[in-house]
Image: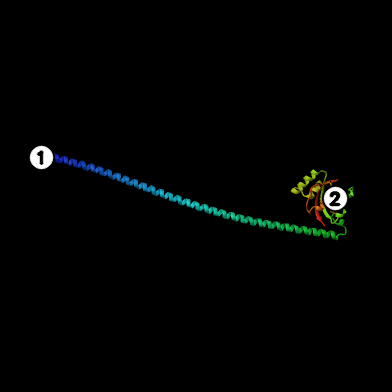
Amino acid sequence: MKRILVLFISLLLVFSNVSMSVYARKSDNTKVKTEKIKTQKADKKAQKQKAKEEKQLAKKQKLETKKQKKADKRLARLEEKQSKKQAKIDKKQAESQEKAYIKQAKLEEKQKKAEERERIRNSKNPNMDPNFVPPVTYFKSNVKSHFLNPNLDVYEVRASHILVKKRKDAVLIRKDILSGEITFEEAAKKYSLCPTGPYGGDLGYFNRKKMAQLFADTAFDLKVGEISQPVGTKFGWHIIKTTDKR
């Protein structure tokens, strides 16, 4: 009986130890699982916090970029406005300078014409003027009287001309003069077949009776400084420039 009791107690102790061991293992496993879950939750929380911070940082950078773009646009508009304003100022200054130059040129031209008129007025004979070139009279010779209109002899003009044989030559020479490649006087010296060529083609002052009608009408109709289209006469083709009227 004692043996049975001892055996029972021994079995009870063994069972108790086994149960305690199993419980301890279960408890340890539970703790491990709990710690693992906590760690996972902490990691998820940290990731969420990191993602939130990154999102806030990206939003902040986006706002700063937007502000910078606005500031750049504002600065560009301001610079463009200032540039336009400066361009207007420069244009006004250029126009003012051009007007002043034109005014001065007109004044000098007017003064020059006044001096010319005064010199001629004070001279008893225009041919005494060293700068005066007598008109070429051969335009009058061999020209029938019906080409002249004495009723139109009201005042005189001073003109220069370039005489060539062919119209196409006159057209090309006129084109070079208007484009600024050569001056009228230089072209007269270089191309004119008239004796006035060495004098820049200057014919001096003449009235309508002194020249062929078409030549005279063209010279009288031109404005001072204006250059005519090629004009044909029996002597050839003329480019006429009226330099003064009186």
Relative height, residue 82 to residue 19 (above, below): below
Q: Earlier in the sequence, mark 2 or mark 1?
A: 1
Tell me the crowding category of disc 2: few under 14, some 14 to 19, or many 20 or more residues within 10 angstroms, Cα based. many
Measured in 3D between alpha carbons, the distance from the residue under mark 2 to the one under mark 1, in whole angstroms, is: 172 Å
Q: Residue at x 24, y 43 (%)?
A: 24
Q: Position of residue 222 (x, y in %)?
A: 79, 52
Q: Residue at x 84, y 58 (%)?
A: 120
Q: Residue at x 43, y 49 (%)?
A: 55
Q: Position of residue 230 (x, y in %)?
A: 80, 47
Q: For the residue labelled by badge 2, is the local secondary structure a helix, a strand or a loop?
A: helix
Q: Quadrant of the N terminus?
A: top left
Q: Based on the displayed image, in which of its 4 quarters is residue 7 positioned?
A: top left
Disc 2 versus disc 1: nearer the observer: 2
Q: Which residue is more in the foreground, 242 or 115?
A: 242
Relative height, residue 101 to residue 45 (above, below): below
Q: For the residue labelled by badge 1, is the local secondary structure a helix, a strand or a loop?
A: helix
In the drawing, does residue 102 fall left or right of residue 198? Answer: left
Q: Position of residue 171 (x, y in %)?
A: 78, 45
* Mark 2: amino acid: Gln
Relative height, residue 195 to residue 99 (above, below): above
* Mark 1: amino acid: Lys
Q: Position of residue 246 (x, y in %)?
A: 82, 57
Tell me the crowding category of disc 1: few under 14, some 14 to 19, or many 20 or more residues within 10 angstroms, Cα based. few
**Mark on residue 185?**
none
Furthest residue toward left: 1
The residue carrying mark 1 is 2
The residue carrying mark 2 is 213
Q: Residue at x 59, y 54 (%)?
A: 80
